[in-house]
Image: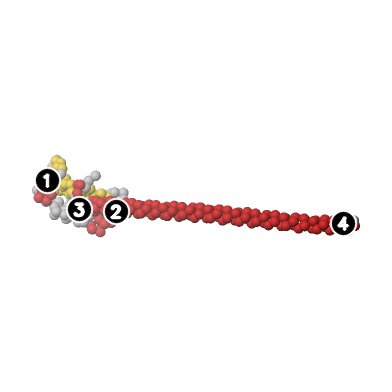
Amino acid sequence: MKKVLTALMLAAMLISAGCGNNAMDGAKKDAEEAAQKVEQTANEAKDAATAKADEVKKDAEAKVDEVKDAANQATEEASAKVDEAKDAAAQKADEMKIEAEAKVGEISEGAKAMRDSMDEISFNGIVPGFSIDEVKEAYGEPVETAGEVLTFMNGAIVNVDSNNNVKSIRLTTGEVETPEGVAVGMSEYVLNDAYGTADAVKKLADGAEYEYHRGKDKVAKLVFKTRDGFISEIESEFNK
């Protein structure tokens, strides 16, 4: 009996040991499977992250390309605008140049007309508009001064304005001639030969007054007064 019990105890111990080994083997297997799942999950997460990163990179590159294209387009448009502005400025400059040249031409014509008019009404180089100092250089000091009227030795009577500029010049002697060679004391018939038909004629009690408009646009005039058929006075002035 004692031997039988011992044998049973040994058998129980052997069975118990076998069961423990089986449990350890199962646990080990479960741990390995869990590790594989963790590794698989990690790999999947890594792949997903990599895919997402690639997608973000592509989107970023696409955005950069869009920005570059927009910048290039903006640059081209700006360059086109600059070219348009340059062309417009060049065209405007040409127009202004043409206008300026036309104005210069008009001014030159006007200046020429004024110069021609001044030449035609000058008495020894003096014309209305000159300063009194210029008159004195040509005629000398006045022999008589009455307000704005100055009388010179050559018979010229000069009327000046408040700025001492000549308003008119009147000749009362034959010492000074007009540019056409007409002087006080000559017959009134020389006027037709020198100047042609008068622009205006006024009859006076003992003679007449002949007015000749000179220069382009008739900006100046010479007035001749006659008495008994002879020139008694010549006046030079600008038309008012």
Is residue 227 visible to the viewer in this orientation of the structure?
A: no
Return the disc, 4 or 3, that comes first in the chain's sequence: 4
**Way the structure is coloured:** secondary structure
Q: Residues within 10 Å of mark 3 (few under 14, many from 20)?
A: some
Q: CA distance from mark 3 to mark 2?
A: 32 Å
**Residue 187 location in percent, x, y?**
10, 49
Mark nearer the N terminus (2 vs 4): 4
Q: Is residue 7 visible?
A: yes
Residue at screen point 21% across, 47% down: 219
Tell me the residue that label 4 is attached to: 4
Residue labelled with disc 1: 197
Q: Nearer the viewer, mark 3 or mark 2?
A: 2
**Which residue bears the numbered disc 3?**
116
Front-most of 228 and 113?
Answer: 113
* Element type at mark 4: helix
214 or 124: nearer the eye? 214
User: How far apart are labels 2 and 4 at the CA level?
Assistant: 134 Å
Q: Are marks 1 and 4 in contact (CB under 8 Å)?
A: no
Residue occupying image coordinates x 19% and y 50%? 215
Q: Which residue is mark 2?
A: 94
Left/right placement of residue 108 relative to residue 56 reads: left
Please say if the residues under marks 3 and 1 sit with CB atoms less than 8 Å apart: no
Secondary structure beneath dot 3 equals helix
Instruction: Determine the secondary structure under disc 2.
Output: helix
Sequence-first tag of 2 and 1: 2
